[in-house]
Image: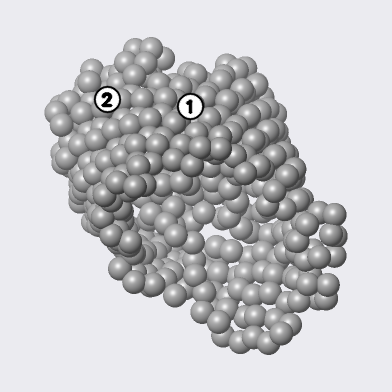
Amino acid sequence: MHQSKQLRRATLCVFATFIAIPTVSAVEVSSNQDYQLNADFELAAGIFTSDKSYRYDTDQDGAQWQEGYIKYGLSGSYSTGNSTAVYGSVNALSSGTWGDGDAGGFTTGDESNTDLEDAYIGFKSGNLLPFLGQDGLDISIGRQNFAMGNGFLINGDALNLGEGLNGGGFDFDRGGAYWLAARKAFDKTALVQIGGDEGVRSDLFWIESDNKVQADTELTGINLEYVSPHGTFGLMHLKGLGVNEPYAQALGLTARDGQNTTSLRYQGNAGVDPLFLSAEFVTQDQGDASRKDADAWYMEAGWSFEQQVWSPSVNIRYSTFDEDFDPLFFGFNRGYGTWFQGEVAANYAGPFNSNTDVLHVGVKAYPAPTVTVGALFFDFSDTARGSGSLDSQELDLYAEWAVNDHLFLSPLIGFFKPDKRAADGGSQFQDNDLNTYAQIMAVISF
């Protein structure tokens, strides 16, 4: 009964990729001058509560749930002479969601799964090619995470649905841990990185997803960068090569087959130390007539008051996304707010970095060397093809605490106010009152 609504919901949800916690860490098991073997381990858990619900299959007002995962395996490298090295990793991941399932209904609370996460091998050139710089050639293949720029278009395959949208022959379940984004690796990759940390460098890549809510998208691309002391300029082109047709049709993603996406970006300080600048412009030609060609862009400026108490900083950003813009595999990169905008909006309520304009103001401070506190404001306008059905505002208050070398904690409380309730075209059930949302995340790594 609810399947058609659920799939329409998934069409929006496909544009939301969620927070990525610190990368897996390692403990040395064995080494000598030629090799190093590490044991990898990372554990993450989160507790979540939302006063309001954004799910089609229930009249429940609010949700409480828990998520967690454990990542474990081996990684290492072997020197082959001229400081060249072969490296690789094999990691498994166990994840789950418990309780009511998330506030968006993408998990039910009954998910759990153990599967392979990383399995890749690579080669670094060391000083074998001095004209490219140290490790100026890096080639890798296999199942691994991959990000480009600040994650505006590609930041891993990190959309982790559970059983909430299953039915009608479709299975989107990746084992839960929806908000934690437990699984981030692309199923198949071939990556070539050319150049060092300064000057001209390039990336050539082919990636293929096995994520059904991404319709198993396959794409290839090239990235060119000029890295200077004052910032990095980047030009990237992506070409969609294929999709899983039944899932693509259900999700409205058939245009990814043959889609061309080109972006131009900059990030740096323009030679002024307290200044932060970041901008990206993207134009997208769709692969078929199911979606219109579209553009998206953002501009951001920030200033750090490093000589003041707690070294506060302020950032202001405006981003705009055309109606049929497909933001592909975007996700968390520089911190809260990039590139999922608003904890409630980006995770459960929408909009999801398409068909919207977003004004964002963020402040951050450092009351102690291991503690960060911040506040994020978002105003979403011109949503839902100009109808304003998903227009809303959100304020998030958060802290990040590196308790020690192995434990990281991050509590957050958010306040989300939609203009419309679900009965009037919005996404929040029961009413359009203020939703109070809270979460706390813990990460243990070695």
Q: Amino acid at mark 2?
A: Ser
SS at badge 2:
strand
Report whether residue 248 is seen: no
* Residue 6's disc number: none
Closer to us: 338 or 363? 363
Q: Look at the picture and state if 351 lies above or below 18.
A: above
SS at badge 1:
strand
Q: Residue at x 46, y 22 (%)?
A: 320
Label 1 neighbourhood size at 10 Å, few (<14), some (14-19), many (20+)? Answer: some
Q: Residue at x 52, y 24 (%)?
A: 297
Q: Which of disc 2 and disc 1 is earlier in sequence?
A: 1
Q: Which residue is mark 2?
A: 392
Q: Look at the picture and state if 71 lies above or below 376.
A: below
Task: Residue 57: give x, y in percent of width and height.
Answer: 27, 37
Q: Which residue is mark 1?
A: 299
Report whether residue 278 is seen: yes
Quadrant housing residue 89: bottom right
The N terminus lies in quadrant:
top left
From mark 1 to mark 2, how far is it between C-alphas?
21 Å
Task: Residue 12: give x, y in percent of width and height.
Answer: 42, 31
Label 2 neighbourhood size at 10 Å, few (<14), some (14-19), many (20+)? Answer: many
Drawn side of residue 198 relative to residue 322, left or right: right
Q: Amino acid at mark 1?
A: Met
Task: Residue 343: give x, y in percent of width and height.
Answer: 31, 41
Query: Outermost residue toward the front?
Result: 307
Task: Residue 68: give x, y in percent of width and height.
Answer: 35, 62
Numbered disc in front, either 1 or 2 = 1
Q: Residue at x 56, y 20 (%)?
A: 295
Closer to us: 281 or 256? 281
Q: Look at the picture and state if 53 lies above or below 86.
A: above
Q: Residue at x 50, y 34 (%)?
A: 277
